[in-house]
């Protein structure tokens, strides 16, 4: 199974964020803005396990991250909100996936799922 197939299979089980970033129509009314309190509360309510979308560690998703970075025009709507841990969010910067794994992470990094996701997002946005 190649990276694209892995992503497609995983996306069916993943949050709405993957679907949104991969091209669903977006409301752009709050592009480049920080998340409001209500959006943050809704993001945490959607995932009571507080699992980081990147490293998949339960209980570590303490920050609400822009799936499509606000520095690149990502909006502050719930459709662009995802939970990330204190390591993965800053490691991601203005990219799509974190550049390094959290301390103590075991396994391949980036994961095949993250590699495939990053490749598709870059292609859909015309990035190299």
Image: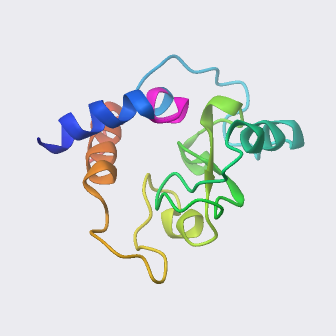
Residue in the foreground of this view, choosing between 71 and 39: 39
Picture residue at 34% right of the left edge, 37% below the top? 10
Q: Position of residue 41 (x, y in %)?
A: 83, 42
Q: Which stretch is magenta? A: 14-19
Q: Position of residue 54 (x, y in %)?
A: 47, 56
Magenta span includes 56: no
Residue at (67, 42) in percent of width and height: 47
Q: Which residue ends up furthest to the left in the rendered image?
A: 1
Decide which of 82, 6 is in the foreground and name it. Answer: 6
Residue 79 position, x and y percent, is 63, 29
Number of labelled discs? 0
Up the image or down, 58 lies above or below 99; here it is: above
Quadrant into which the N terminus falls: top left
Quadrant of residue 9 in the image? top left
Residue 122 located left or right of residue 38: left
Q: Is residue 10 left or right of residue 52?
A: left
Residue in the image at 59% along x and 59% along y: 58
Picture quadrant where residue 19 is located = top left
Residue 24 position within the rendered picture, expressed as x and y whole percent measured from the top left = 47, 19
Q: How is the image coloured?
A: rainbow
**Main secondary structure found in the magenta portion:** helix
Does 102 sit above or below residue 118?
A: below
């Amino acid at each position: 199974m190649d990276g694209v197939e892995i992503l497609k299979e995983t996306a069916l089980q993943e949050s709405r964020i993957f679907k949104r970033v991969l091209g669903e129509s977006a409301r752009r009314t709050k592009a480049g803005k920080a998340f409001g309190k209500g959006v943050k509360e809704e993001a945490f309510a959607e995932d009571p396990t507080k699992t980081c979308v990147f490293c998949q560690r339960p209980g570590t998703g303490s920050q609400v991250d822009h799936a499509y970075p606000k520095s690149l025009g990502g909006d502050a709507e719930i459709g662009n909100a995802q939970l990330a841990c204190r390591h993965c969010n800053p490691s991601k910067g203005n990219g799509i996936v974190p550049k390094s794994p959290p301390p103590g992470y075991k396994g391949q990094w980036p994961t095949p799922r993250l590699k495939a996701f990053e490749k598709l997002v870059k292609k859909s946005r015309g990035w190299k």
